[in-house]
Amino acid sequence: MSNQKQIDLDFLRQMLQSAERSIQSAMRLLDDKKELTSAEIKQLEKRDNEFKKKAKKLSILEKDKIIEGVFDGQNMIGPDEKQYPIPANYASKSKLVEGDVLKLTIAADGTFMYKQIGPIERKKIIGTIIKEDGEMKVNAENKKYKVLTASLTYFKAEEGDQVTIIVPKDKESTWAAVENVIKKSNGDVAKLDDDLDI
């Protein structure tokens, strides 16, 4: 099989996995007992439209398979409005925040390599890990943020632990990056470092 066909097959596989995650996420929303209010739906639509608008200004270089896009908390949104899956371990270790600009390079063997090229302004806040609708979230400053499971698993974080999260400085966000965790049992601080396997 030619390298080009292999790249196309790997790319298609990645896109299908991304679509599957999106469908699973949508199914969880449908299964949730709590229905989204019209204000929450409008806020999510506004956020998605902002990411798409920002991504449209970025580029795709077909020759080298280089795509720039915007991080939405889980995936990268490209100028073509497609979602490109980002490994949770990479997003956790890099402490990616909603709105960050990334560059994806698709290697000849089909490997996806991401690089953060345009971080947005950030701020750190402290919150508490809670469990809601079967998901671990962080309750901070009267808002509940979603966080990547990979970060919480790495820290061995549990419900009730305090956590420092990173969010956009001047924008509302649904997702937050985990900076460190203060375990409720002994007060030890767990920091995300280079030992995280990516």
Image: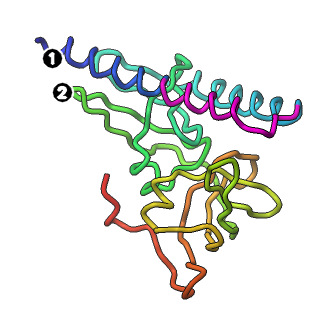
Q: Which mark is residue 90?
A: none
x, y percent for residue 198: 31, 51
Which amino acid does the dot numbered 1 rest on? Answer: Asn
Residue at which label 1 appears? 3
Could you say which is closer to the camera, residue 82 or residue 185? Answer: 185
Residue 31 screen position, x and y as percent: 69, 33
Q: CA distance from mark 1 to mark 2?
A: 7 Å
Magenta region: 20-37
Left or right relative to 192: residue 137: right
Q: Position of residue 168 (x, y in %)?
A: 67, 52
Q: Residue at x 81, y 30 (%)?
A: 41
What amino acid type is highlighted by mark number 2?
A: Asp
Residue 62 sits in quarter: top left
- Magenta includes 68? no
Image quadrant in which the N terminus is located: top left
Q: What colouring style does the render use?
A: rainbow
Locate residue 81 relative to residue 66 in the image: left or right. right
Residue 73's place in the image compared with 148, above or below, is above
Q: Which residue is mark 2?
A: 109
Name the residue: 54% across, 88% down: 186
Quick check: marks 1 and 2 in contact, CB under 8 Å? Answer: yes
In the image, farthest residue toward the bottom: 186
Relative height, residue 93 to residue 18 (above, below):
below
Q: Secondary structure at mark 2?
A: loop
